[in-house]
Image (cartoon, rainbow, N blue to C red):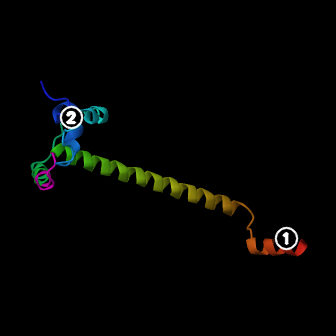
Amino acid sequence: MRCPSSPRTWGRTELLAPGQNTGYNHWRDVLEAQVVWKINVSLPEEVLEQLDLAARESHASRSALLVQAVEHFLAKKEEERKQENRRQATEQISRLADELDPWDGPADVLKWRDRH
């Protein structure tokens, strides 16, 4: 029987750098465990060789590096989506401003001040 904190059982420890999970606190491992799915991925040989080299150099597993790469990619895509939303909002504001009468803020403030 495997220990519940085993990377094969819980997946969480597989994603940690060496030394981060000492295994001394079994209940912490159980409470922080996450569901991990296994998938098949096809990679060109050159990419696999680079992945293996990077894994050895960083003392991490292939899975850990792939998780980091996917998380980085998804974060970048989310930021691009937010930037596109901001760009569209800016365009919409500009169109609305063009449709409205031009407003000279300082002149209106001076008129208001002179009346009061």
Determine the residue positioned at 22% across, 36% down. 11
Q: Main secondary structure of the magenta part?
A: helix
Q: Look at the numbered discs 1 and 2 and tell me whether their residues touch, using CB distance below 8 Å.
A: no
Q: Which sits earlier in the primary sequence, circle 1 or circle 2? A: 2
Magenta region includes residue 16: no
User: In x, y percent, where is residue 18?
Assistant: 16, 48
In the image, residue 90 above or below residue 25: below
Q: Which mark is residue 112?
A: 1
User: In 3D space, how far apart are the residues under numbered discs 1 and 2 (Cα atoms)?
Assistant: 68 Å
Q: Which residue is mark 2?
A: 39
User: Which span of residues is magenta-colored?
Assistant: 54-61
Magenta region includes residue 55: yes
Determine the residue positioned at 67% across, 62% down. 97
Give the SS element for disc 2: loop
In the image, residue 111 above or below residue 4: below
Quadrant where the C terminus lies? Answer: bottom right
Quarter-of-image position of residue 93: bottom right
Determine the residue positioned at 74% across, 68% down. 103
Amino acid of disc 1: Trp
